Amino acid sequence: MPKNFSDIEYPAKPPATATDESLTILDLFKLTGKVASITGSSSGIGLGIAEAFAQAGADVAIWYSSHDATEIAEKLSKKYGVRAKAYKCAIDNEEQVKNTIHQQIKDFGHLDIVVSNAGICWTKGQFIDQPDNQHFHDVMNVDFNGSVYVSKYAGQHFRERWQKTGKKGSLIFTSSMSGHIVNVPQLQATYNAAKAAVRHFAKSLAVEWAPWARVNSVSPGYINTPIAEFCPEELQNQWWALTPLGRPGEVKELVGIYLYLASDASSYTTGTDIIVDGGTTLP
């Protein structure tokens, strides 16, 4: 296995989809015949990604931790005519993550796309005022360590499949605009640090995995999902005052970015982070 950048053998030719003149740009966005695995996909952004991928023709593996997503998988399968299955996994448990990915490979045959999306928010105010470090560890273990575990076992599969078939994988991380800025007025240093780590980890893996997989991240801003419901209306109004578009984003306004990064339309895109935040990070 390569230990240094100079030891990595890079393919010199573009993929066939990039040079096939019979394919339209819309053809490149299709995921027909591909298998996608999305963590944290029983609700919110993750569910929106899973449904978008199913609409584009992909079979989907749904991850959940507490709320059973079996019915969600069944609905997606029936509505879009794809294979869909739900898997319960504690994303901060490396052994469970490994077993879940291996089971998905067994059930679907392979994985083409993996989205590391599961995450939790920091809700405790100033870090130094916490009586212990438990919430810090909870956020870091789910938001960063969980992404590391997912990428480790997804990457092993991508590399093995590339060696056997020449087909490359796509790994997409959900980072956050909070990995670029310090949000105000809420105090969430731990969450910001975790998401910044995810974004830079993605860039680093993009170099290491260049022969066998593309690695990118998406940094959403304030999106209208249940995860934001704990925030009082007064606080949310302050967010909109700092957002040039003056409102939260909807899931459907975000998931197209994931579709692009998952599809052959982005075959020359790796190591990038795409911000979708209504302009919040601009000022």
Image (cartoon, rainbow, N blue to C red):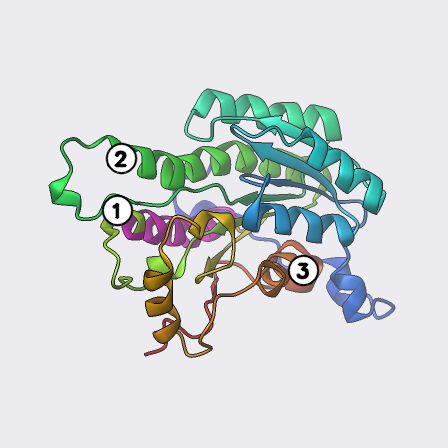
Mark before the other along the chain sequence, 2 or 1: 2
| Residue 160: quarter of image | top right
Q: Amino acid at mark 2?
A: His
Q: Quadrant of the C terminus?
A: bottom left
| Residue 282: quarter of image | bottom left
Which of 22 and 276 lies nearest the eye of the viewer?
276
Residue 164 position in % (x across, y down): 70, 35
Q: Name the side, left or right, on which 185 lies relative to 61.
A: left
Q: How many marks?
A: 3
Q: Which residue is located at x 33 percent, y 49 percent? A: 197
Disc 2 packing (10 Å; few <14; some 14–19; many ≥20): some
Q: What residue does disc 2 label? A: 135
Q: Name the side, left or right, on which 202 lies relative to 75.
A: left
Q: What residue does disc 1 label? A: 190
Q: CA distance from mark 2 to mark 1?
A: 9 Å
Mark before the other along the chain sequence, 3 or 1: 3
Q: Amino acid at mark 1?
A: Thr
Q: Name the side, left or right, on which 108 lies relative to 117.
A: right
Closer mark to the observer between disc 3 and disc 1: 1
Residue 34 visible in the current orientation: yes
Closer mark to the observer between disc 2 and disc 3: 2
| Residue 77: quarter of image | top right
Residue 73 position in % (x across, y down): 72, 35
Under circle 2, the secondary element is helix
Q: Amino acid at mark 3?
A: Lys
Q: Which residues lie in the magenta part?
A: 192-209
Q: CA distance from mark 3 to mark 1?
A: 42 Å
